[in-house]
Amino acid sequence: MERTLLMIKPDATARNVIGRIISMLEENGFKVVAIKSKHFSREEAERFYEVHRDKPFFDDLVNYITSGMVVGIMVERENAVKALRELVGATNPKEARPGTIRAVFGESIERNAVHASDSYENAQRELSFFF
């Protein structure tokens, strides 16, 4: 079994779709192992997104992710990282496959409802921000 992180972002928590996103996880074979909500400090957000530090959207991303509550969800299943990335869908909700989390709940590239770890190594690092 593999574990990974799904983080529900401030746009989705503000719209009260946390439960609907969790239902999609469970309906797609993920076991919810742990859940924790928090508000990222600027320092935490900068560390969480450090891989994007040199990109032009870094400051906007940090400002956005610190703008409200996020929910970290540790999920488990076989090939969890790959399976979750498929369920989450493309970064741009307009390009996401119908039925994916971002196609259903995303509003824009920035306000795309969720973050999912992109590798096993990053999942371990990102899970440590919540658990």
Image (spheres, rainbow, N blue to C red):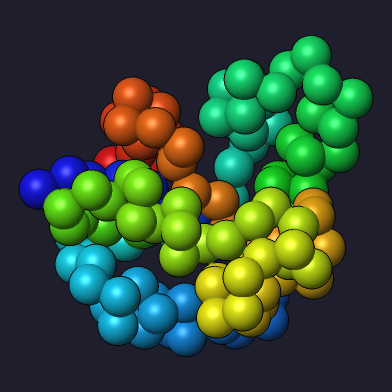
Tell me if 18 is positioned left or right of 46 in this view: left
| Residue 34 image position (x, y, % from top left) | 24, 58
**Residue at coordinates 40% horizontally, 80% vertically from top-left?**
24
**Residue at coordinates 57% horizontally, 61% vertically from top-left?**
89
Q: Where, quadrant-wise, is the C terminus in this rendering?
A: top left
**Residue at coordinates 52% horizontally, 62% vertically from top-left?**
88
Say if 113 sits above or below 26 in the image: above
Q: In terms of image quadrants, where is residue 50?
A: top right
Q: In terms of image quadrants, where is residue 76?
A: bottom left
Is any part of residue 128 visible from this angle? no
Q: Residue 61 versus residue 120: which sits nearer the camera? A: 120
Residue at far top of view = 54
Is any part of residue 86 visible from this angle? yes
Q: Residue 80 versus residue 124: which sits nearer the camera? A: 80
| Residue 62 image position (x, y, % from top left) | 75, 36
| Residue 13 image position (x, y, % from top left) | 61, 72
Residue at far left of view = 1
Residue at far right of view = 56
Q: Residue 16 versus residue 102: which sits nearer the camera? A: 102
Tell me if 123 is positioned left or right of 46 in this view: left
| Residue 120 image position (x, y, % from top left) | 31, 32
**Residue at coordinates 46% horizontally, 58% vertically from top-left?**
86
Say if 57 sits above or below 106 in the image: above
Total count of labels: 0
Tell me if 121 is positioned left or right of 10 in this view: left
